[in-house]
């Protein structure tokens, strides 16, 4: 400006725009974090439900090998391939795997050779539990 002082109206307008801008940015960050936490909790609950459904398909036997009676699980069908699972026995033997894995394998340490199949930027999530009581 050419040495002329800013008007009170302009100063108030700039201050109001700055305050509203910072408030909107802060609110957006808080809402984003809240939605992210809520979605992760919802996803983890769904993962636990799927794991329980898969665990319920294992038939425990006092004698002889345990058996896996696979029921319908849409997320693990070979055509849809939105999820993968393997059921490992405590002795390290593989009891069952999802049709969506085809010939691929999941390692017990959580690494996989399926990196090319999942969306870029989304880390795999893993749930493991033991049947021993």
Image: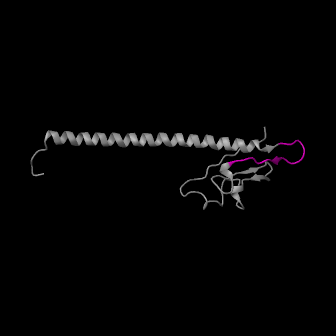
Q: Is residue 81 magenta?
A: no
Single out the residue that lies furthest toward the top: 133
Identified at 72% across, 55% down, the residue is 99
- Residue 92 or residue 41, whichever sits in front: 41
Residue 18 percent coordinates (x, y): 27, 42
Identify the main secondary structure in magenta.
Answer: loop
Q: Is residue 70 magenta?
A: yes
Would you place residue 39 above or below residue 124 in this image?
above
The answer to whether residue 106 is seen in the rendering is no
Identified at 75% across, 41% down, the residue is 56
Residue 15 figure quarter: top left
Q: How many marks?
A: 0
The answer to whether residue 27 is seen in the rendering is yes
Would you place residue 108 above or below residue 59 in this image?
below
Identified at 58% across, 40% down, the residue is 42
Identified at 65% across, 52% down, the residue is 83
Residue 104 percent coordinates (x, y): 70, 61
Region of the chain picked out in magenta, as a range: 60-73
Residue 132 percent coordinates (x, y): 78, 40
Left or right: residue 21 versus residue 3 is right
Residue 77 percent coordinates (x, y): 69, 53
Protein image colouring:
one colour
Quadrant in the picture for the C terminus: top right
Residue 30 figure quarter: top left
Left or right: residue 29 versus residue 5 is right
Single out the residue that lies furthest toward the right: 63
Left or right: residue 119 versus residue 95 is left
């Amino acid at each position: 400006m050419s040495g002329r002082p800013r008007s009170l109206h302009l100063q108030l307008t700039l201050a109001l725009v700055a305050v509203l801008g910072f408030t909107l940015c802060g609110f957006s960050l808080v809402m984003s974090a809240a939605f992210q936490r809520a979605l992760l909790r919802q996803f983890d609950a769904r993962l636990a439900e799927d794991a329980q459904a898969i665990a319920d398909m294992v038939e425990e036997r006092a004698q002889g090998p345990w058996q896996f009676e696979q029921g319908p699980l849409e997320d693990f069908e070979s055509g849809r391939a939105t999820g993968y699972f393997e059921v490992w026995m405590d002795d390290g033997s593989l009891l069952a795997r999802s049709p969506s894995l085809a010939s691929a394998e999941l390692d017990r340490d959580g690494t996989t050779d399926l990196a090319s199949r999942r969306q870029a930027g989304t880390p795999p999530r893993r749930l493991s539990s033991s049947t021993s009581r």
